[in-house]
Image (cartoon, grey):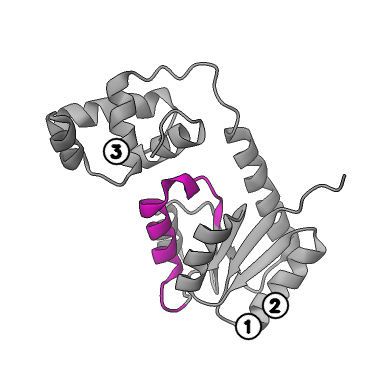
Amino acid sequence: MAKARRKILCIESDGETAAQIAAGLSKRGYDVGVARDGREGFLAVLKDGPDLVLCEVSVPIMSGFEVLKQLTEIAPRLGHTPFIFMTETANREIELKGRQLGADDFVTKPIDFDVLTTIINARLVGVARTKVVPKLAPLNEREVEALTWVARGKTSAEIGRKLRLAKRTVDFHVDNARIKLGAATRTEAAIKATTWGLIKP
């Protein structure tokens, strides 16, 4: 039985560039979809659930940054989907902002397909590894409750009101859960907990 081709969504406003990327990645065994602006790309991610997103930072209607931010906020289950930004030139400020939003990598144009393919393969392998559920995830009831609301986009203050807890108590439980799950941020902790089936946003 033939192995299923991994799905990549390319969000790129320039038609010629999008066609080149789609052709280049298709030759390398990927199933590539194309969106021409940020909003179209955002909806395509929600609808099609690609294995990886390749997005130009400066796409119209919704910028690449806005696409990633909105995906993280309203669809936490998609937070583990690798997200790679494309830029015209290397720019430290742009890269820092993108990584703060959760971007996995950056590539510059014109695209070097050998480099891009190496990055894509590494990211997809990384996702496969995170799908291995740990034998024990020692989250207590309060930690599960708090992370569930984090995954739904609620702040600590909002969670505190729902659970009738002080904000600092919520922060305490979320931080404990984050440490137990080996996550750098509360968002990453919520993503891991969702991926492993520990919470249901």
Which sits in the foreground, 28 or 36? 36
- C-alpha gap between disc 2 and disc 3: 41 Å
Q: Earlier in the sequence, mark 3 or mark 1?
A: 1
Label 3 SS = helix
Residue beneath disc 3: 149
- C-alpha gap between disc 3 and disc 1: 40 Å
Question: In the rendered view, would you say 89 is above or below 123?
Answer: below
Q: Position of residue 174 (x, y in %)?
A: 29, 30
Residue beneath disc 1: 15
Compared across the picture, whether 108 is left or right of 198 comes to: right
Label 2 SS = helix
Image quadrant where residue 70 sits: bottom left
Question: In the rendered view, would you say 86 is above or below 3?
Answer: below
Q: Residue at x 50, y 72 (%)?
A: 40
Compared across the picture, whether 44 is left or right of 119 comes to: left
Q: Over which residues does the magenta segment extend?
A: 60-83
Q: Position of residue 72 (x, y in %)?
A: 40, 52
